[in-house]
Amino acid sequence: MKVRKATQEDFLRVHQFTAGCPPMENYPEHVYKIILRYFGDCCFIAEENGHIIGFAMGIVPHSFPGTIFLWILV
């Protein structure tokens, strides 16, 4: 297993992966593209044999330095 930062180019694969993880809310493809473009430093993908097996997205609030809000973990 390999964990790496997600990139904007991963948006479609992330969307497809999260769509298969009910009951998690699956956002439209373009939402993942925007999230990965602007918040990619806080998004991580776990891969095994080239397949996504996990995704984590966090948000770093500017008003709370040193804090990360974990939004998605699948």
Image (spheres, helix red, strand yellow):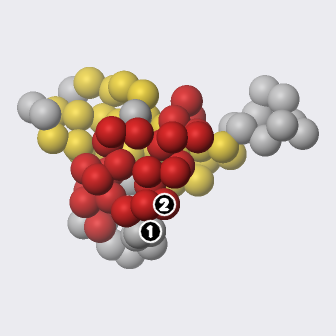
Say if 23 sits above or below 9 in the image: below
Q: Which mark is residue 31?
A: 2
* Disc 2 packing (10 Å; few <14; some 14–19; many ≥20): few
Identify the residue at the far left of this view: 49
Q: Residue at x 36, y 25 (%)?
A: 4
Q: Nearer the viewer, residue 56 or 12?
A: 12
Give, as a three-letter code, the residue at label 1.
Tyr
- For the residue marked with disc 2, what is the amino acid? Val
Secondary element under disc 2, as helix, strand or loop, is: helix
Question: Vertically, is 71 above or below 61?
Answer: below
Please name which of the two marks, 1 or 2, marks the residue nearer to the observer: 2
Q: Residue at x 43, y 61 (%)?
A: 30
Residue 66 occupies which quadrant of the picture? top right
Q: CA distance from mark 1 to mark 2?
A: 6 Å
Tell me if label 1 and label 2 are in contact, CB under 8 Å.
Answer: yes
Q: Find disc 1 in the rendering and name its residue.
A: 27
Instruction: Inspect this view and state whether residue 34 appears.
Output: yes
